[in-house]
Image: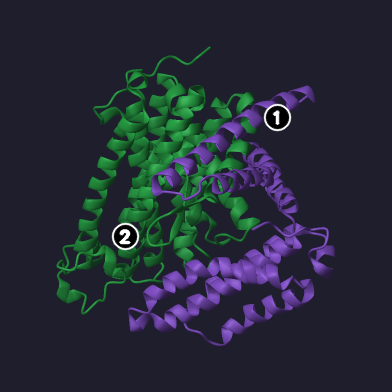
Amino acid sequence: MHLPDGFLDGKTALLTSAASLAGVGMAVHRLKKTLPPRQTPMLGLSAAFIFAAQMVNFPVVAGTSGHLVGGVLAAVLLGPAAAVVVLACVLVVQCLMFNDGGLLALGANVFNMALVNGAAGYLLFMVLRRLVPLRGDRAVVFAAVMAAWAGTVAAAFACGVEMACSGTVAWGVAIPAMVNIHLLIGIGEGALTGLVVAAVLRSRRELVAAVRGGGEGQRRGLVRAGLPMAFGLALFGAPFACPWPDGLEAVARRLGFEHRALLPSFPSPLADYHLPWIGSVGLATATAGAVGTLTAFLGAWWLAARLVPPTAAGKDDAPAAP
Amino acid sequence: MLPPRHETAGGPARAFPSPGIKLAAVLVLVGFTALLPRQVNWCYLVPASLVLGAALWSRPSLRHLVGRLLAAEFFILGTGLLALFSPASRPLFLAVFLKSNLCAAAMALLTWTTPFHELLGVLRRLRLPGVMLSTLALMIRYLPLLAGEAHRMQRARASRTFRPRRRIVWASLAEIIGRLFLRSANRAERIYLAMCARGWR
């Protein structure tokens, strides 16, 4: 999902860079106030950990493999502000040391993977954790799986929007292709995130920021995390301002309202994931999304019930160990 | 994929003193290339000749250059596959293909001639916040270590599971990543004590 240079035009690169600067700046500002000195080396080690975890491949389907993005994993383990800083550092090193992702596209990559995947994914995690009728650690694992899955899809969606907004790939191609592939890869991301969170909860519970944090800090964090979400919404609205194609048409196409006639004989690039009897690509993407959501939901529930023993499930966020 | 060993890497360009100027030059070059019109024309010769000149000057190992370009090619060609479905976008894709390869080559030359700690110095002079600087510095210090540990754990897993079934693959992958996190947390605690012992803060 690392965008190389050359795929984005000036305005998209500038817009995403500004959003990333604002988001990372906010996270740094928050960390300056809340990070205990004891945790300083933990950030560096976590960045190295996320980088190393991204190098572990998991099998997806038919011999292909994916790897973690790790945004939600980092946010659940470290808290949202630390996760944004850690993920931004990972992306800087990947760009300036390993040439993974472009220099001008760094802002867009930070936006997609640190802000959309990490911060917005964490917001979803918090909401789901409150809403789901599971208790204690089961709710944590369930919400982590779902948020990791949705965060991956959202990051891929943002990536597609950026490419389409730059005029590199047509709207009707970029978004279905990116989203459909990541509906599948996201299941791997979700499963692995859930398994890792459950494993850490079992052995070193006090290391998981999501169950350690006091109530006061979390509530404020939720408000702060709302801003990256607003950026995400701005991105969603960007096609309205985007000259290519007509904004409303783009939204209509994305939401699947557009009639097939407007996309003359468009061959589906990913026939496997499209249901053949549904004509419009947009509608097929929406259907695939709905099926994916249902699959992720059931899978998350199953994993949560299976990974967390019943004794730990009843444990509601106990005060942190002294 | 490890970074080049900089005792030997870099060629004559390694002697060029200022990493800041190199970074700025690459940024200008990448920006210029990325903003070129999306029709292949003579303008593309400018960044191409600059990249070629820089390559001749810094003499990268073929392995480094080709490896980095191939790594970028996955995304570029994957997206190019999509362009094949709409004939109108084929010339556009050719332009994007050239652009991203030129930029990737420029970046590969930058990493060949400039070790990351020098770029970190540039970022420090640019007043990057302290928490990011320390995170970056600790990260590149401990990255080879953790990557090595992840690799060793994967190899140990591969030599122990005779025929990996899908469920076991997932469980052991998660076990490896979880264990890696615990190890990095333990190490962070020890580093903190070591930092305090040396009078940090």
Say which colour chain A has. Answer: green
**Label 1 is placed on what type of residue?**
Ile
What chain is the purple one?
A: B
Q: Position of residue B145 (x, y in %)?
A: 68, 43
Circle 1 chain? B
- Which of the two residues, B94 or B65, is positioned nearer the viewer here? B65
The quadrant in which residue A314 appears is top left
Q: Position of residue A242 (x, y in %)?
A: 34, 64
Circle 2 chain? A
Q: Secondary structure at mark 1?
A: helix
Quickly name the residue at label 2: A180
Mark pair 1, 2: CA separation:
43 Å
Tell me: A134 left or right of A148: left
- Which of the two residues, A305 or A251, is positioned nearer the viewer here? A305
* Residue B191 badge: 1
* Residue A176 badge: none
Say if residue A19 shows up in the picture: no
Q: Position of residue A20 (x, y in %)?
A: 49, 49
- Which residue sits at x=48%, y=70%? B76
Q: Is residue A197 above or below residue B109?
A: above
**Label 2 is placed on what type of residue?**
Asn
